Amino acid sequence: MRPLIRTARCWLLRARVRAMATLPMASPAAAIPSSATRPVASPSSRSHRPLTRFFSVAPAPVGAKGLRAAASAVEVGGVKIAREDVVKEDDPTNNVPDTIFAKIGLQLHRRENHPLGILKNTIYDYFDKNFTGQFDKFDDLCPLVSVKQNFDDVLVPSDHVSRSYNDTYYVDDQTVLRCHTSAHQAELLRDGRTHFLVTGDVYRRDSIDSTHYPVFHQMEGFRVFSPDEWSGSGLDGTAYAAAELKKTLEGLARHLFGAVEMRWVDTYFPFTNPSFELEIYFQDDWLEVLGCGVTEQEILKRNGRRDHVAWAFGLGLERLAMVLFDIPDIRLFWSNDKRFTSQFSEGKLGVKFKPFSKFPPCYKDMSFWINGAFTENNLCEVVRGIAGDLVEEVKLIDNFTNKKGMTSHCYRIAYRSMERSLTDEEINNLQLNVREAVKDKLKVELR
Ligand code: DAH
């Protein structure tokens, strides 16, 4: 049954993606207000990446190892996704660049010797040990999902910032690259599942620094309870599910981090009520581990589980793996360099990464007058389109408005390879190309 859901879903979507491609649309850049960050997660947390259009084609990244620059189709769960299903230069409702298409199907979380695969399997071990045979596991559901699955099915309000073209990759106005694994909750419930874990690659337009990358990985957990499970407990369904949730996730945190101090923080998610974040005290700081809560009744009701209750959680694999394996930069997860990949092996959680190079970053500044449509996410997409994984950070260092009301931004771009030293000539060329692309694509006036 499992391959069927996945396969049917992908094929259905592909058919619709094709059908939609010819429909005319107003320019979404103009229609949807932009914003800098986004919470599908709680409003404050940038950590889940926390949960954050316009041009379609980015030039192939320079020296970005591991990208299949020339690939025209990729495979997910045995299904082919062609480049033209996802990247549509001439469609104004599409904002997926080639750099993102190049990541689809890589599925780092399915590599047994990769930190993300090791972490996924360690979480599986916890659920297998404590809930033997109960949780169904999915790790190759198609990342192309409908707007309905990604947002409506999990009650994300129609004006929520995470729906904007500035924050989410749209294949067309009805189809996105999922921005969270919560996008699969409703379909799995309708399929009759009551206990499941969904791991997958998720996609978000965002700014650039050492902990943010436009593709990352999440795991979603979901458990449904029927009335007879809580009737004898003296608690109502919601309180029972919340207590079960906390017990389960505290156990998971101990399984991953050992005997750590923990705290629960109240927060907001559209799909749960109450909603919480679990934090642990680790390496002298409070670290947000995951978001979770008691599933909104409406979701259960719409998907065949009226009168039931459920808990759900979502966690970002990279942020946990960075801490557990001491990985200093999120770009490293994508490295094919043996000096990175050979350091990790199946079943060994928490082996500390030994940096193999300490090349200094090289900084280049650029200033320009912005226009009304300018957003930092768009800038970062242009920079990544030129420099690929050689860009480490894009940071606003100066911002002023002159007497005529024109606003100037100065951004400092840090270039650094994780694998080799960059020559002055190479960086100067990159910067030159970045300046040209920023001017052309963002229509800003360089200073
Ligand atoms: N989807 C949320 C995000 O990406 C994470 C999350 C939070 C998932 C709470 C859940 C949940 O299932 O209950 O930020």
Image (cartoon, rainbow, N blue to C red):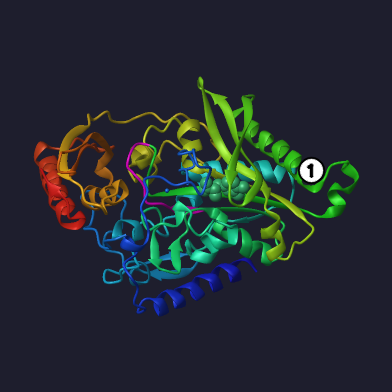
Observer-nearest residue: 268 or 321? 268
- Residue 341: image x %, image y %? 39, 41
Q: Residue at x 48, y 48 (%)?
A: 217
Q: As displayed, is residue 129 above or below residue 146?
A: above
Q: Which residues are magenta?
A: 200-210
Kind of residue at disc 1: Tyr
Q: As displayed, is residue 138 above or below residue 360?
A: below
Horizontal side of 120 relative to 71 (left or right) equals right
Whether label 1 lies within 8 Å of ligand 1 gets the answer no
Q: Quadrant of the N terminus?
A: bottom right
Label 1: few (<14), some or many (≥20) within 10 Å? many
- Residue 287: image x %, image y %? 52, 30
Observer-nearest residue: 189 or 405? 405
Horizontal side of 365 relative to 131 (left or right) equals left
Q: Residue at x 29, y 46 (%)?
A: 376
Which residue is outermost to the top? Answer: 284
Mark 1 lies on residue:
240
**Is residue 281 shown to the viewer in this render?**
yes
Magenta span contains residue 207: yes
Q: Residue at x 60, y 71 (%)?
A: 4
**Is residue 134 shown to the viewer in this render?**
no
Which residue is outermost to the right? Answer: 232
Observer-nearest residue: 135 or 95? 95
Main secondary structure type of the part rendered in magenta? loop
Q: Secondary structure at mark 1?
A: helix
Horizontal side of 162 relative to 141 (left or right) equals left
Q: Residue at x 48, y 31 (%)?
A: 323
